[in-house]
Image (cartoon, grey):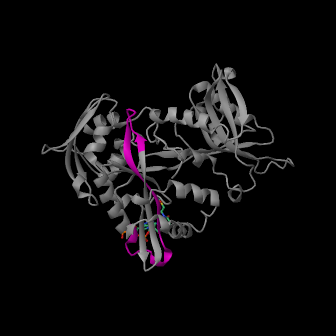
Amino acid sequence: MRVLRKADWSIWYGTLARAFGGALESSVERDLWEALTEHDRSLGLWDGDECVGTAGAFTFRVTVPGGASVPAAGITMVSVAATHRRRGLLRTMMRRQLDDIRAWGEPLAVLTASEPDIYGRFGYGIATQALSAEVDTSRVRLSVPPGTDGVRLRYAAPGEVLDACEAVYAQRVPERPGMLARRPGWERLGLLDPESERGGQSPLQCVVAERGADVVGYARYRIKPDWDHRGSDSAVHLSELEALDPAAHAALWRFLFDIDLTTMIVAPGRPVDEPWLHMVSDIRRCSVRLRDALHVRLVDVGAALEARTYQTPVDVVFEVEDAFCPWNAGRWRLTGDSKGASCKRTDEAADLALSVRELGAAYLGGVSLASLAGAGRVRELRQGALTEASVAFASAVAPWLPHGF
Ligand SMILES: CC(=O)SCCNC(=O)CCNC(=O)[C@H](O)C(C)(C)COP(=O)(O)OP(=O)(O)OC[C@H]1O[C@@H](n2cnc3c(N)ncnc32)[C@H](O)[C@@H]1OP(=O)(O)O
């Protein structure tokens, strides 16, 4: 195992692409990932001159409850060649990565997983969920709030309005836990549009919402129209939508509902607290589903719990189990409120017992400690501590990340 050399990137990426069934082959996508790869934070496993394992770690800052932007390693591009499976190569890379991240002083590691079962054993908890919907727009009506008609919508080529859309995105980042402050280059992720992956849909289209001279929202989408009125799978496929206020949000969704020759909006990967869910006439015809999204690992329990705030005052002692990163194991006393927090080692009696995986799941405020206790994964040792901590950890805005990495 060695740190990735720039000259080895093509071979390394080839190993990754093969592990994903050769699906990552578009040259635009490839060029973007090459530009974004942080070589000195990436690992390759070599068997002679053959690359048999890959793993990377982006330098991210992730929004946490309270709005702070906390350094996090974005774990990515993990693969092991099928010829070398189930001999512990992933485990070897995970070990090295978490040691490195600790040495870099980053309190969190985050990832989106190809399969949800892989990373729990390394202390990652599922901290956010994404909502997918298939809205039957031939039957469902949308009621919009006052002010919606004051928003002007304008078609634009996605690339031409990229800066204005990215400025909207940047304003949203501190408002929602789980979002990433994007470094230069990452904005291009939203423009990837390989023809091979369109499956009969149009190229990427964009509409911006404006109030006066200001861009206050945008939507990127593709369309599969129903030319011959067979009504089969004509749909608007939403790729991305951000809005700065309720009227802009409503105007963009009304636009998606109104596109002629389509009878459905397919919207994957949306936040679980999207306002439009409360604007539809028939939620049952929206085929809402949930799936795991961002997995969070506290690499440094004390620093991570101090980096966020708590919506109500909290004073609890956690007994933390962490077999994979034993420096986190033991008792931690967390005191905090909406202004700040302290989390220090303690010998006092524990109030709640849990593993670092549950702390990761609850960290962004979207998964309740009480719910995890219901699953037997958190134990209450002092009566009242569970409710106190559950309420304090919760976030008024559901954590969410709009894209994978
Ligand atoms: C953040 C991301 O990049 S997500 C992308 C992950 N990559 C992929 O899905 C690409 C296709 N898959 C692969 O390349 C490989 O199967 C990997 C990387 C998932 C696993 O690599 P391996 O080297 O076979 O894993 P390794 O032998 O180290 O297994 C470690 C443990 O994880 C378990 N495990 C490995 N893969 C999986 C899986 N897909 N589902 C459930 N458990 C798994 C093993 O059983 C083992 O368990 P144990 O510790 O209890 O014995």
Observer-nearest of 200 and 126: 200
Does the image show residue 165? yes
Q: Nearer the viewer, residue 374 or 334?
A: 334
Image coordinates of residue 119 in percent, x first then y, are: 40, 59
Residue 213 sits in quarter: top right
The residue located at (40%, 59%) in the rendering is 40
Residue sitting nearer the eye, 248 or 131: 248
Where in the figure is residue 379, as x and y percent of width and height? 26, 48
In the rendered image, residue 356, in percent from the top left (x then y), is placed at 30, 52
Where's residue 182, x and y in %?
49, 43
Residue 64 belongs to the span the image colors magenta:
yes
Relative horizontal placement of residue 63, taking residue 337 as reference (left or right): right
In the rendered image, the residue lying farthest to the right is 228
Locate residue 89: give its quadrant.
bottom left
Instruction: Verify whether residue 329 appears in magenta.
Output: no
> Seen in the image, is 310 located left or right of residue 253?
left
Q: Which residues are magenta?
A: 61-90
The image quadrant in which ligand 1 is located: bottom left
Q: Is residue 141 visible?
A: no
Task: Please tell me how many numbered marks the rendered image carries.
Answer: 0
Which of the two residues, 273 or 71, is positioned nearer the viewer here?
A: 71
Residue 39 occupies quadrant: bottom left
Instruction: From the viewer's perspective, tell me whether residue 180 is left or right of residue 136.
Output: left
Furthest-bottom residue in this view? 48
Q: Quadrant of the N terminus?
A: bottom left
